[in-house]
Image (cartoon, rainbow, N blue to C red):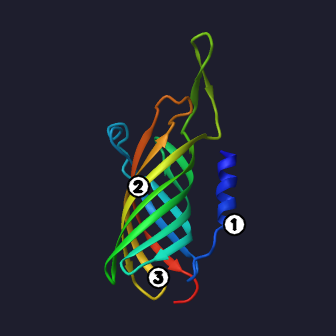
């Protein structure tokens, strides 16, 4: 995992800045477990936040493409506290001058910190409680979004998406976990207007 984090950091340092300046995106979101795990957890509010910076951008007449580096985290008291980094590709179709419909896809490392003690199997068939600093894993994301410019350098965002995390649980008891998230936030472009 440290190799992946160093690689992402090196990519950020070496990446060319978009001609019009980088973009900064900040969102707040609510995380929920998704199919097939929806019956496991009933708690409705699991707050999270995400921030990202654009590394590359290509703008067309109706299609824009961007590469992002982002960090996110959320608190789900019954399942996990999560911290994640990711590289993300975004394609936006501008249906009108004031309405962009986007698709986001990404991949990156994730650290999941599970609530309470975890039980580790011993060689004799018994289990022992164990504390941990988190379980490393990977997270793939897919989101659909709406972007509305509200000023020369500012846009309002709404995004709905899912993540697919593997492995899940400190003992790798589940091969994967799925989540859905509703993001609301803003994006700011630095540089020329």
Residue 13 is labelled as 1
**Residue designated by label 3:** 154
Residue closest to the eye, 146 or 181: 146
Residue 136 is labelled as none
Residue 121 image offset from top left, x and y in percent: 58, 19
Mark found first going from the N terminus, 2 or 1: 1
Q: In which quadrant is the N terminus drawn?
A: top right
Mark found first going from the N terminus, 3 or 2: 2
- Reply above or below: 97 against 7: below
Tag 3 and tag 2, C-beta contact below 8 Å: no
Residue at 66 percent across and 52 percent down: it is 5
**Residue designated by label 2:** 142
From the viewer's perspective, is the residue at label 1 or at label 3 nearer?
Answer: 1
Compute the Cα span from label 2 to label 1. 25 Å
Judged from this view, the residue extending furthest toward the left is 95
Residue at 51 percent across and 90 percent down: it is 193
Q: What element does badge 1 sit on?
A: helix
């Amino acid at each position: 995992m440290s190799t992946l984090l160093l690689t992402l950091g090196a990519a950020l340092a070496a990446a060319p800045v978009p001609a019009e300046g980088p973009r900064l995106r900040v969102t707040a979101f609510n995380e929920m477990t998704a199919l097939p795990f929806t019956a496991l957890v009933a708690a409705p509010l699991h707050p999270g936040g995400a921030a990202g910076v654009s590394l590359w951008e290509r703008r067309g007449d109706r299609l824009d493409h961007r590469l992002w580096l982002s960090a996110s985290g959320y608190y789900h008291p019954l399942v996990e506290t999560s911290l994640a980094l990711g590289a993300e590709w975004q394609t936006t179709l501008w249906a009108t001058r004031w309405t962009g419909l986007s698709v986001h896809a990404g991949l990156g490392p994730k650290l999941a910190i599970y609530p309470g003690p975890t039980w580790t199997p011993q060689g004799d068939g018994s289990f022992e409680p164990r504390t941990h600093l988190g379980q490393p894993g990977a997270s793939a994301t897919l989101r659909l979004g709406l972007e509305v410019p509200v000023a020369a350098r500012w846009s309002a965002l709404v995004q709905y998406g899912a993540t697919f995390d593997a492995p899940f649980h400190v003992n790798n008891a589940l091969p994967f976990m799925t989540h859905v998230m509703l993001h609301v936030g803003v994006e700011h472009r630095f540089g020329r207007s």
